[in-house]
Image: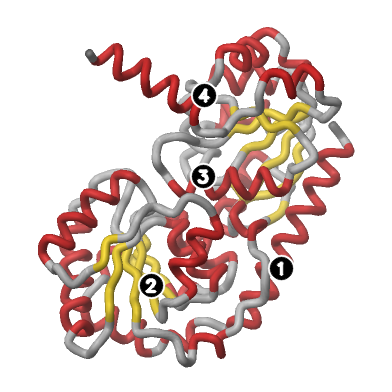
C-alpha cells in the first residue's frame, strides 16, 4: 500500500500539477531550455508563488524544474543531456544551505552554464564545499536580503540583494489611504516547516488577542499557506467557531483577494507576510527563523516583526495600534519596484549570456 501511495504521489507531482512543459514543446520549440531548482509540489503556496514569479520573469523560455518528482523524459534529459540546457535558475526560498538533491544539481553545474539566483536565502551554515564550485560559474541575480548577503560573503560572492523572488509579481502602487475605510477583518496564519515548542506560548498569546478584539467587533479568518497549516486552522476553528477557515490560495491573484479587504494580518509563514506587503496590508511577522528578518530588513520594516520568544498580548496590541508608524507605504512601494526592476535587469543579462 505504501508503494502504491508513493507511485500515486510521484504521478501527481510529475504529471498533474502543471509544473512541466510538454515533451513536444521541448522537442519543437526554438526557445531556450532553462533548468529551475526550487521546491515544488508538496502543498506549500510559498514555493508555488515563487515559481509563478519565475515563470512570469522567464516567459520567453522553457522552464524545467529539476527535482525528484519529474516526468521520466525530463529526468533523462537532465541526466544524459545537460548541455541541452542554456542556463539554470535557483528559485526562491533558503536554498543555499543544505541541499537534498545534490546529484541533479551537480550534473547541471558541471555543464558550466550560467546561473540566475532569484532572490534566494542563504543559511548561515551552508555547505561551502558544495556551493563554492557552483558559484564559480557565471552568476547573475542576487540574494533575498542583507542577512543572506552577509552569510555568503565567506566565498567572495559578488552579487546584489534582489528582495524576495515573489516581488517580481508586484503589479501596482500600494495606497495606504485605501485602508482607511476597509472592513474590520484580520487574517491569521499559523504554520512552520518544523514543530517548535516556543510556538505553543506564541500562539496562545495570539489567541488572547483574537478573543479580546473579537469583543471589539473585529472579524477573524485563518488563511493556510501549506497543507500542514490546514489541520492547525481546523483545530483553531473548533476552539473559536467565529473564525472563518479559508482555503490555500491557488495563485498570486487569489492570494491578493484574501488580503485586499483586511485591515491587519498576523502570520508565521514567510510568504504570508510577503503577500501582505505586496498588497499593502499592515501585518505582524512572527519571526521563528532568520529568513523573516532577512525579508523585513530588505524593506526596512523590521518593526513589523517580533521574535517568537517575545510574543505576548501587550506587544501584539502595541504593534497593531501603532502599525501606521511601521509602514511607510510610499517607501515600500519604491523598494518593491526597485527590486522588481533589478530582478529583470539581472535576468536579461543572464539570458544574454546563455
> Looking at the image, which is closer to me, 156 or 250?
250
Q: Residues within 10 Å of mark 1 (few under 14, many from 20)?
A: some
Q: Residues within 10 Å of mark 4 (few under 14, many from 20)?
A: some
For the residues marked 1 and 2, what is the alpha-carbon distance in whole angstroms? Answer: 22 Å
For the residues marked 4 and 3, what is the alpha-carbon distance in whole angstroms? Answer: 16 Å
Of callouts 1 and 4, the N-terminal one: 4
Residue 309 image position (x, y, % from top left): 25, 65
Q: Which mark is residue 337?
A: 1
Of callouts 4 and 2, the N-terminal one: 4
Q: Which residue is mark 4?
A: 15
Image quarter where the C terminus lies is top right
Look at 67% across and 76% down and name the residue there. Answer: 173
As drawn, 15 above or below 351 = above
Of callouts 1 and 2, the N-terminal one: 2
> Looking at the image, which is closer to me, 333 or 30?
30
Image quarter where the N terminus lies is top left
Residue 26 image position (x, y, % from top left): 74, 21
Q: Which residue is mark 2?
A: 265
For the residues marked 3 and 1, what is the alpha-carbon distance in whole angstroms? Answer: 21 Å
Q: Which one is closest to the eye, mark 4 or mark 2?
A: 4
> Looking at the image, which is closer to me, 209 or 141?
209
For the residues marked 1 and 4, what is the alpha-carbon distance in whole angstroms? Answer: 35 Å
Which quadrant of the structure image shows residue 253?
bottom right
Residue 197 image position (x, y, % from top left): 18, 52
Look at 30% across and 68% down and name the residue there. Answer: 221
As drawn, 154 above or below 189 = above
Residue 212 image position (x, y, % from top left): 17, 84
> Is 132 on the left or on the right of 263, as rendered?
right
Query: Badges 1 and 2: C-beta atoms under 8 Å apart?
Result: no
Q: Which mark is residue 48?
A: 3
Amino acid at each position: 500500500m505504501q508503494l502504491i501511495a508513493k507511485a500515486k504521489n510521484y504521478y501527481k507531482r510529475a504529471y498533474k500539477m502543471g509544473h512541466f512543459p510538454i515533451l513536444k514543446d521541448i522537442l519543437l520549440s526554438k526557445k531556450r531550455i532553462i533548468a529551475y531548482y526550487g521546491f515544488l509540489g508538496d502543498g506549500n503556496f510559498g514555493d508555488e508563488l515563487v515559481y509563478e514569479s519565475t515563470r512570469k520573469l522567464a516567459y520567453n523560455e522553457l522552464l524545467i524544474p529539476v527535482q525528484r518528482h519529474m516526468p521520466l523524459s525530463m529526468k533523462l534529459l537532465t541526466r544524459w543531456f545537460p548541455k541541452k540546457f542554456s542556463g539554470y535558475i535557483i528559485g526562491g526560498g533558503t536554498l543555499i544551505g543544505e541541499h537534498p538533491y545534490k546529484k541533479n544539481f551537480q550534473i547541471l553545474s558541471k555543464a558550466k552554464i550560467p546561473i540566475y539566483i532569484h532572490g534566494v536565502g542563504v543559511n548561515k551554515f551552508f555547505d561551502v564545499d558544495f556551493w563554492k564550485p557552483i558559484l564559480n560559474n557565471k552568476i547573475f541575480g542576487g540574494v533575498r536580503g542583507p542577512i543572506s548577503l552577509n552569510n555568503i560573503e565567506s566565498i567572495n560572492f559578488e552579487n546584489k540583494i534582489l528582495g524576495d523572488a515573489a516581488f517580481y509579481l508586484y503589479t501596482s502602487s500600494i495606497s495606504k489611504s485605501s485602508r482607511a475605510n476597509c472592513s474590520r477583518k484580520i487574517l491569521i496564519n499559523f504554520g512552520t516547516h518544523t514543530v517548535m515548542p516556543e510556538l505553543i506560548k506564541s500562539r496562545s498569546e495570539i489567541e488572547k488577542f483574537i478573543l479580546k478584539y473579537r469583543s471589539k467587533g473585529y472579524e477573524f479568518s485563518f488563511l493556510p499557506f501549506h497543507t500542514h497549516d490546514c489541520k492547525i486552522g481546523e483545530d483553531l476553528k473548533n476552539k473559536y467557531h467565529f473564525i472563518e477557515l479559508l482555503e490555500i490560495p491557488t495563485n498570486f491573484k487569489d492570494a491578493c483577494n484574501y488580503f485586499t479587504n483586511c485591515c491587519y494580518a498576523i502570520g508565521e509563514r514567510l510568504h504570508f507576510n510577503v503577500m501582505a506587503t505586496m498588497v499593502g496590508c499592515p501585518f505582524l511577522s512572527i519571526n521563528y527563523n532568520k529568513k523573516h528578518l532577512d525579508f523585513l530588513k530588505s524593506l526596512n520594516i523590521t518593526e513589523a516583526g517580533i521574535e517568537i520568544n517575545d510574543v505576548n498580548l501587550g506587544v501584539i496590541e502595541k504593534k497593531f495600534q501603532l502599525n501606521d508608524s511601521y509602514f511607510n507605504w510610499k517607501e515600500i512601494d519604491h523598494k518593491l519596484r526597485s527590486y522588481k526592476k533589478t530582478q529583470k535587469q539581472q535576468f536579461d543579462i543572464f539570458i544574454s549570456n546563455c
